[in-house]
Image: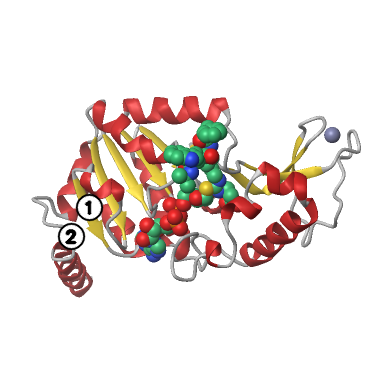
């Protein structure tokens, strides 16, 4: 046990040198979290990368072979719903074998310790829910849900693959992925929950997002303007890095458990 602690401490100390030139260490952040009444977390594809889920814009990114507008947009679906379903079936097959990693699991443990805890995720992979996160807004939707374009009914669907054309059991309409595409507005209740969580939190953790997609990219200043201490955990610097109070560089699966 003692060796582990030493190893742990050395491990944490090594991270102290991996941070951006900050006056805070990850231990300081852990201590702040211990005193916090309300913590909000914003996650992106980077938190699922350690589960083997490709990110969007990384070297192995999903967008490498496709342009988002070609596939993740209402026009693309209107133009060629079969092609869009082929892309989502490919992603569903990919995701079907992926499980939450220590970063997702550490957030579930934090949720049990902190009076007011909320996760806002841009990810559509369902891994936060699978890990057991209760207070969750999936602001870009969920790849395991489908929505009828006629009657708007939303249902769970884990078919591998979804056979084309998928039709609604209620009205026979064409089903689409229940995902927010570029040019589509986010669901009102997701936005309301998110802004409430950003405005009430003492600490905002931003984990594994490139900070390029709106409105999520504008969430950090909202929390900051309401007095939150903002922390970024990412492999690289992002547009968030100049806004946050402290930015740590490293893998989410290694950094997030250190906050416990
Ligand atoms: C909207 C669903 C109102 C698809 C997604 C010009 C200026 C400002 C805004 C706009 C503009 N033009 C258009 C807009 C609006 C547009 C937008 O923001 N465009 C951007 C590209 C400029 N936004 C919208 O359209 C949104 N709707 O605004 O409604 C409106 C209506 C009409 C017109 C205008 C406005 C809807 C946005 C939602 C789009 N849907 N996904 C699908 O998933 O199938 S976005 C897509 O990107 C994913 O959801 C993803 O979650 C999201 C963000 O990406 P990230 O999660 O950050 O992933 P990324 O790969 O980019 O980065 C990964 C990060 O992890 C990296 O930083 C990497 O370093 C790090 N990392 C990697 N490994 C690790 C790690 N970190 C830690 N540990 C690791 N191991
Ligand atoms: Zn229907």
The percent position of residue 247, horizontal first and vertical second, equals: 22, 52
Look at the image and tell me whether residue 23 can be seen: yes
On-image quarter of the N terminus? bottom left
The percent position of residue 22, horizontal first and vertical second, equals: 11, 52
Residue 86 bears which disc, if any? none
Cβ–Cβ below 8 Å for labels 1 and 2? yes
What is the basis of the colouring in this image?
secondary structure
Disc 2 target residue: 19
Mark count: 2
Image-quadrant location for residue 223: top left
Q: Earlier in the sequence, mark 1 or mark 2?
A: 2
Q: CA distance from mark 1 to mark 2?
A: 6 Å
Q: Secondary structure at mark 2?
A: loop
Q: Residues within 10 Å of mark 2 (few under 14, many from 20)?
A: some
Q: Residue at x 62, y 50 (%)?
A: 72
Q: Residue at x 58, y 30 (%)?
A: 187
Whether residue 166 sits left or right of residue 73 in the image: it is: right
Q: Residue furthest left?
A: 23
Disc 1 target residue: 247
Look at the image and tell me whether residue 128 can be seen: no
Residues 63 and 27: in front is: 63
Residues 162 and 238: in front is: 238
């Amino acid at each position: 046990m003692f060796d582990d602690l030493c190893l742990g401490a050395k491990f944490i100390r090594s991270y102290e040198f991996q941070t951006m030139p900050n006056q805070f260490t990850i231990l300081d952040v852990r201590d702040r979290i211990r005193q916090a009444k309300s913590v909000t977390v914003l996650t992106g594809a980077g938190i699922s990368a350690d589960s083997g889920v490709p990110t969007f814009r990384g070297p192995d990114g999903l967008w490498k072979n496709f342009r988002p507008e070609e596939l993740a947009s209402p026009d693309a679906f209107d133009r060629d719903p079969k092609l869009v379903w082929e892309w989502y079936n490919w992603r569903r097959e990919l995701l079907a074998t992926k499980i939450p990693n220590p970063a997702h699991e550490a957030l579930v443990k934090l949720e049990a310790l902190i009076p007011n805890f909320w996760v806002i995720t841009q990810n559509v992979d369902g891994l936060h829910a699978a890990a057991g996160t209760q207070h969750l807004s999936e602001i870009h939707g969920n790849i395991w849900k489908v929505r009828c374009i006629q009657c708007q009914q939303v249902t769970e669907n884990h078919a591998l693959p979804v056979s084309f054309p998928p039709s609604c059991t209620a009205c026979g309409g064409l089903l689409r992925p229940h995902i927010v595409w570029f040019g589509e507005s986010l669901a009102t209740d997701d936005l309301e929950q998110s802004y409430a969580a950003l405005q009430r939190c003492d600490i905002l953790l931003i984990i594994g997002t490139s900070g390029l997609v709106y409105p999520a990219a504008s969430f950090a200043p909202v929390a900051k303007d309401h007095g939150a201490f903002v922390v970024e955990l990412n492999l690289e610097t992002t547009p968030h890095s100049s806004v946050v109070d402290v930015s740590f560089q490293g893998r989410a699966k290694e950094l997030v458990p250190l906050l416990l």
